[in-house]
Image (cartoon, rainbow, N blue to C red):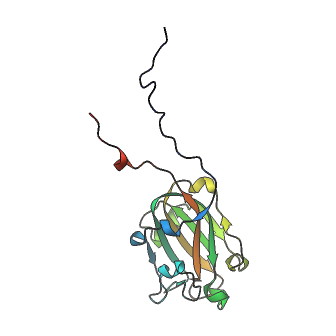
Amino acid sequence: MATTFPGAGAAPPQQEPADNGKLMSLTDKIDKSDCYARNEASGFPMTNLFIGDSRLGCKSDADEQLIIHISFQEFVKVHSLKFAEFNQGINPEENPTKIQLYVNRENLGFEDCEDVDPEQILELTAADLRESADPITLKYVKFQRVKSLTFFIEDNAGGDVSALGSLKIFGRPIQTMNMNDFKKQG
C-alpha cells in the first residue's frame, strides 16, 4: 500500500525565479517621495543627480559635507555605484573624496554619521568620477537587502562645497511575494 502525504498530487509550491545575475539601473525603483538631502544647495538639489546632465548635479550648501538619502520602492540588492563629477570636473576641488555608505538607516544626521559605523567607506579619486570610469563595486554581502541607502559625503578635494554630477545605482530587485495576491480560503 502506497503512503500518501498531505498535499500529494497538488501543484508544487512556487519557487522564486533563479537569479539570472543581470544587473540593472535601480533608478526606476527609487521612491522619490521618501528621498532627502541634508545641507544641499537649493539651486542644486539631489534630484538633479538622476536627470543625466552633470551640469545640473547636486552641491552641498554651507560646507563640504552632504547627506543624500535614497529610498527604494522595494527591497533591492545593490552591486555597484557610478558617480560622475560635476560639470565635467570644471571645479575638481569640489569632487568628493570620502563617502560613507549606510544601509537601511532612516533619518541620519551629521552627528549620527560620527557615531554609527558605515557598511562601507569609499575613497574616491578624480579618475573614479570620470564619465568613462567603471562603476565602483560594493561589498556585495552588505548590500543584499536594501530598502534605503544613505551617502555621507564627508570630505572633498579641498573645496568649500562638494559637488556631484550624477549618481547611478546598479543591482537588482529582490523577488518577494505580494501578500495581496493570496486569496482567502475556507
- Towards the viewer: 31 or 155: 31
Please give the name of the residue rendered at 51% of the width and 84% of the height, measured from the top-left corner: 60
In this figure, what is the number of numbered marks? 0
> Where's residue 48, x and y in %?
50, 82
Q: Residue extending furthest left?
A: 186
Q: Quadrant of the C terminus?
A: top left
Residue 130, compared with residue 20, is above or below; it is below
Residue at (71% x, 75% y) in the render: 133
Indicate left or right for 134 with 165 as reference. right
Query: In this view of the protein, can residue 97 be seen by the observer?
Result: no
**Residue 57: percent from the left, percent from the top?**
55, 84
Q: Is residue 20 visible?
A: yes
- Farthest residue, direction top: 1
Residue at 50 percent across and 63 percent down: it is 115
Q: Is residue 84 above or below residue 13?
A: below
- Pick the front one: 108 or 77: 77
Nearest the viewer among 27 and 62 is 27
User: For residue 93, which quarter of the picture?
Assistant: bottom right
x%, y% of residue 173?
Answer: 52, 57
> In the displayed structure, would residue 133 be above or below residue 74?
below
Find residue 129 and report its horizontal and vertical position in percent. 67, 78
